Amino acid sequence: MVIRGKGPPVAWDEWEQLKGDALQRARGQTHMRLNHVPPDSGGTPNRQGDLRVNQTDLAGVGDGAYDLYQAFQHDSDLARMNSLKAASGLASEGFEIGSALDTVAQHWVDQARTLLDATAHISNHLDYTKGAHAGDEVYISGMLSGIATLEKGFDERKGS
């Protein structure tokens, strides 16, 4: 394969050889993909589950998602700008690969936006969950203290 432009032709023989070697290595390896645990995996099923999460764990995940969002937004913007600049430069010099790089850069923007949306969703959801559960705690505490007051009143009335 040769790229046509103003510069000298570029041979892709080495690239094609590397791709072929990688494909051969992949075919020679056994890959496993675990989509689920078989229902008859032994042991007694835990009907209540064993996952326990506290607010510190949730805050750590939310903070990690926020940090990833910030770092990736910055880095992906740099990659996008540099890719578009390179695509424009190559196209202006008459290299056909310039338009191909521009297409890749546009797809990069879509993929980056998807990852940014996902990390923002995780971070925002965990912030919301933390706030909602804090409100639940206040409500439940208020209900329980009200019940304790009622019980005290009943006890006083009975003369206990």
Image (cartoon, grey):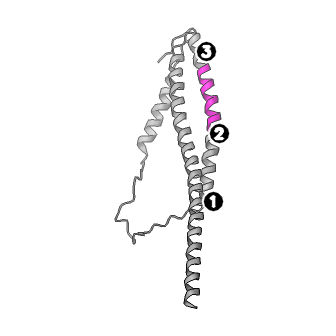
Disc 1 marks which amino acid?
Thr
Secondary structure under the numbered disc 1 in the rendered image: helix
Q: Residue at x 62, y 49 (%)?
A: 64
59 w.r.t. 22: above or below: below
Q: Residue at x 62, y 55 (%)?
A: 59
Which is closer to the viewer, label 1 or label 2?
1
Distance from disc 2 to disc 3, alpha carbons, whole Å, reads 27 Å
Q: Position of residue 96 (x, y in %)?
A: 51, 14
Q: Residues within 10 Å of mark 3 (few under 14, many from 20)?
A: few
Label placed on residue 48: none
Q: Which residue is mark 2?
A: 71
Would residue 73 be seen by someone viewing this image from the given angle?
yes
Along the polypeptide, which appears first: circle 2 or circle 3? 2
Distance from disc 1 to disc 3, alpha carbons, whole Å, reads 49 Å
Would residue 7 be seen by someone viewing this image from the given angle?
no
Along the polypeptide, which appears first: circle 1 or circle 2? 1
Q: Position of residue 103 (x, y in %)?
A: 50, 22
Magenta residue span: 71-85
Between 113 and 129, the one nearer to me in the picture: 129
103 w.r.t. 63: above or below: above
Q: Residues within 10 Å of mark 2 (few under 14, many from 20)?
A: few
Label placed on residue 89: 3
